[in-house]
Image: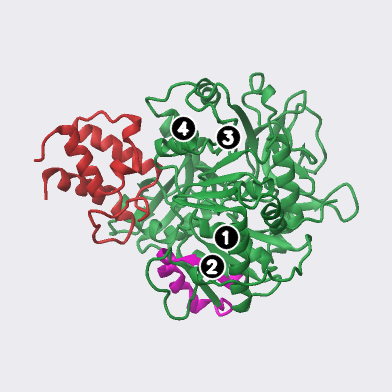
Amino acid sequence: MSAVNSKVREFIKDNFMYRDDRADLADTESLLDAGLVDSTGILELVAFIETEFSIQMADTDIVPDNLDSVDTIVRYVEGKIGATA
Amino acid sequence: MSIIRIEDYLAANARTRGDKIALVAGARRLSFSELDQLSDRVAAGLRKGGVQRGDRVLVFMDNCWEAVVAIFAVLKAGAVFSPINPSTKADKLAFVAGNCRAAAILTQAKLLTIVNDVLPSCPPLALTMVATGGKGEVPEGCVSFDAACATPCEALPREGINLDLAMLIYTSGSTGFPKGVMMTHQNIDAAATSITTYLENTSNDVIMAVLPISFDYGLYQVLMAVKLGATLVLEKSFAFPQAILNRIREERVTGFPLVPTMAALLLQMRDLQPGQFPTLRYITNTAAALPPAHIARLQELFPTTTLFSMYGLTECKRCTYLPPAQLKARPGSVGIAIPGTEAYVVDDQGQKLPFGSTGELVIRGPHVMKGYWENPKATQQALRAGPLPQEMVLHTGDLFRTDEQGFLYFVGRKDDIIKTRGEKVSPKEVENALYALAGVQEAAVVGVPDPVLGFAIKAVVALDGGVALTAADVIRHCARNLEDFMVPKIVEFRDRLPKSENGKIARRQVEAESLEAVQ
């Protein structure tokens, strides 16, 4: 598991998963379909990514293709920081 | 006088514009003919499963094409649909199913765990019809929605008339127990006709529905689009505003209904430029007035779009709208009565007050509900004698003021109901959930102003001695027992809560203290 993956997972676990009785989350599972995040959840996720990884997210980046699962978030973040840790 | 039933909207458009796209939901596009045929088939499946005229049928689904088919199928079976928010938990679903003695439930595979928890306690719930979206088998004891859709049949004979109940929408009550708002076909047709009149809708409209169809504002987008022969673009969530804006552009959407929380989310976007959405003819807002600064910014970003400020409650669907020409002069007003209805304010004795007064908003018209399902006490409070014998008018429990020309301005609620992200939350219902958590001794739930949510739900809790609970524990407990929008965003712990002279927890005082803290 990459460093980005574990940071993203930790954030999701601390901030969204405790709301639900979920032990685990698959890397490919849709956060939206699973009911883990809503509109304010996405705002929190964006704020986390921007602070944690020093990325400025454009509006056009804030779409399901980049943010709807652990996998897509990791791919997006790693693409932006230009390196896999 | 209209003799239309709601399902007639669909049959009429299937005849005159059958090939036109009625519904776009994700990758699925359904024409009016297809929607008509699928709902005929599911209606036949419901009838085969024992559903009779007047039976109540729960539609427990998210914003998917199956939900639209389900609603029309229930009506074609002569039954009454009750849309249930997909984030509803087992206890509440059991309450609703028991309260209306539901004969059937239409749901999705992903919600079956909750339905299964409820089934044993609801004996009249004879039929569970499940949509799997083509994935997986339907469990034993359930009927397949998808199989019903694939089974050719004749349309059921029409039995009902438009005075029959069409739907029950459950709304938060100040007692903590939801109340089923009874709407007839005639009520819905009156509301839909009035609204589409002032919005100047036509069959050329393409309407975006991103609000849950369990919420009447979302639901009416479906009903009105089908009435008009317009196209509905159904989306599940506004979590990704950019994705919705992309859909607006792709589908050439002309009408975009939103609530203040969605407007706040839109206005937080950084790269939105004025004039990017030339097809968008109108934006509507309801649930609460938009802050004037948000109105100004929306007008700047959508210069060719007309903005309608409106107000409503489930009990009559919509009360008022502000004619757009008045927006500049009266940005804080939610306007005047919708066409064909009356809206006025009364004093505590129920006497109509002159313009320039503050009082309770009263609504008169053919859109006013028939009462709360089997709840005469709450019905008596809301529906009171009108000007004609046997006529009932709706006392909304909302305080409004009128200006000298009669335009209405929201002042506040007469009860403690909190409005958060466009939905009504009864503090009592959340407090009941909190008291069910071991270790909670006292609880008060209040709304605190929030730039995005309107009001955020805050729980103020005192614990039993020696108990250690964290805010996360409290929120987790609530999330297991309440719909998403009712779950507190903020939890504050105190040693004890303030009491009134008679020893009851002084929620108003807690609220005032919470407001002071944020200012």
Mark 1 or 4: the one toward you = 1
Q: Is residue B112 left or right of residue B401?
A: left
Q: Give the crowd class for mark 1: few <14, some 14-19, many >=20 residues within 10 Å.
A: many
Q: Are marks 1 and 2 in contact (CB under 8 Å)?
A: yes
| Residue B366 rendering spot, x and y as whole percentages | 79, 49
Residue B402 versus residue B442 in the image, above or below: above
Task: Say which residue appears at 58% left-offset and 58% top-offset.
Answer: B34
Of all chains, the one bearing label 1 is B
Judged from the image, the secondary structure of the residue bearing numbered disc 4 is: helix
| Residue B447 rendering spot, x and y as whole percentages | 49, 42
Q: Are marks 1 and 4 in contact (CB under 8 Å)?
A: no
Q: Which residue is mark 3?
A: B254
Between residue B217 and residue B374, name the one nearer to us. Answer: B217
Q: Are marks 1 and 3 in contact (CB under 8 Å)?
A: no
Q: Give the crowd class for mark 2: few <14, some 14-19, many >=20 residues within 10 Å.
A: many
Of all chains, the one bearing label 3 is B
Residue B332 in view (yes/no):
yes
Residue A15 versus residue B262 in the image, above or below: below
Q: Which three-letter amino acid code belongs to the residue tagged 3? A: Thr
Judged from the image, the secondary structure of the residue bearing numbered disc 1 is: helix
Q: Which three-letter amino acid code belongs to the residue tagged 1? A: Val
Instruction: Say if the magenta span includes residue B101.
Output: yes
Q: Which residue is mark 4?
A: B264
Q: Earlier in the sequence, mark 1 or mark 3?
A: 1
Q: Which residue is mark 1?
A: B69
Q: Which residues are magenta?
A: B98-126
Q: Which residue is mark 2?
A: B149
Q: Is residue B162 left or right of residue B62?
A: right
Q: Residue furthest front?
A: B19
Instruction: Say if the magenta span includes residue B141.
Output: no
Q: Which three-letter amino acid code belongs to the residue tagged 4? A: Ala
